Image (spheres, rainbow, N blue to C red):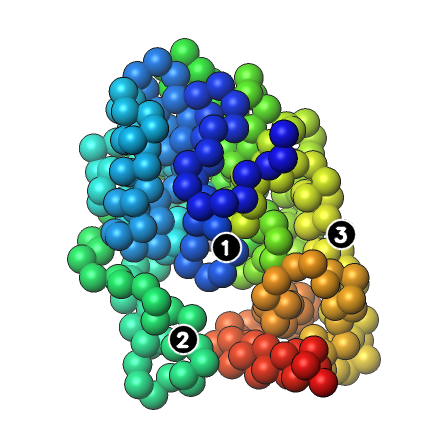
Amino acid sequence: MPHPHTPGLHRLADETYAYLQGTCATGYSNAGLVCSGDEALLVDTLYTLGQTRQLLSAIAESVPAVDICWVVNTHHDGDHWWGNQLVADALIVSSTSAAQTMRHAGPETVVPFLSPDTDPRLRAILEPFDFAGITPTYPTITFDGELELTVGRRIVRVIEVGPAHTIGDVIIHVPDQGVVYAGDVQVFGGHGVVHSGPIDHCIRACDTILELDADTIVPGHGPVGGKPEVIRVRDYLERVRDHATAAHQRGQSPAEAAREFGFAEFADLEFAERVILNIGAVYREINGDGTPGAGQLLHQMVDLEESLKTRVSA
Ligand SMILES: [Zn+2]
């Protein structure tokens, strides 16, 4: 059976679901639902209250008899927890470091991007979203390492793999159904982003997922996949790491390094301009002084996007 990719709630296995928003563009993340009897665990809430309401009504329509007792936020990026207030009766779980980072990662962080002074190309990324009414609602249970939860009669494992994509990433493993919800350490169909790094931890997270030997992997963004998609993400990350390390050694800027990346090999992945964020993360690791900063890289990302478009149309 092909893996689902269209928007909506999809049954993956017995009482195990993925909710997809049908694109791996910024702000359109996936969610998951694991049920047993009348209990359910929700993996991630979404970027806006509107998105999260749609998710909850899709659940109410297809799986009406369950009560969401648990929510696991895979990390602190807003598109994975800003809808928490709509499921505030549940026990909300994250890693300790994700929960700490959430305190500084509420909706106020998007305000500078929406200001009229901001580069309109950057503003356009967030303009489709209505952030009104969000009250940051934080995890009530935090852990380090690994946590085992019981949902009805089903065991669900929550495994910390960060710092990788962000400082406190976790993945969720449903052993009896062979399903892993990976958060943003996996993005399928598009370039993912290494925010905190180190990139070697992102590569290690791929190995951790592969070792779980699950057949179904739900990425943080993009269509559902399996082990081949995880191996592809690992190949991509290794290629980025090696390319960026060599370019840094040659004294090239991140923008120069990004323009020379081997895009042809990853032509099936959307949002190629994101590679500059990942090259920048490797540079930051080597430099060890916080440079290049994320803000600077975002501006260079929209420049790169433009130059890649002209390259294709030329
Ligand atoms: Zn995300």
- Neighbourhood count class around disc 2 (C-alpha, 10 Å): few under 14, some 14–19, many 20 upward: few
> Which residue carries the number 3 mark?
235
Q: Which of pointers 3 and 1 indicates the residue nearer the eye?
A: 1
Q: Quadrant of the N terminus?
A: top right
Residue at x 58% of width, y 51% of height? 187
Picture layout, residue 153 above or below residue 241: above
> Which residue carries the number 2 mark?
124
Q: Amino acid at mark 2?
A: Ala
Q: Amino acid at mark 3?
A: Asp
Residue at x 35% of width, y 13% of height? 37
Q: 6 left or right of 71?
A: right
* The one of 288 and 217 positioned closer to us in this rendering: 217
* The one of 67 and 142 positioned closer to us in this rendering: 67
Disc 3 and disc 1 in contact, CB within 8 angstroms? no
Residue at x 26% of width, y 62% of height? 131
Picture layout, residue 215 above or below residue 299: above
Q: Secondary structure at mark 2?
A: helix
Of callouts 1 and 2, the N-terminal one: 1
> Which residue carries the number 1 mark?
23
- Report the residue that reaches farthest toward the bottom: 117
Give x and y (percent) for residue 248. Answer: 75, 75
Of callouts 3 and 1, the N-terminal one: 1
Q: Secondary structure at mark 3?
A: helix
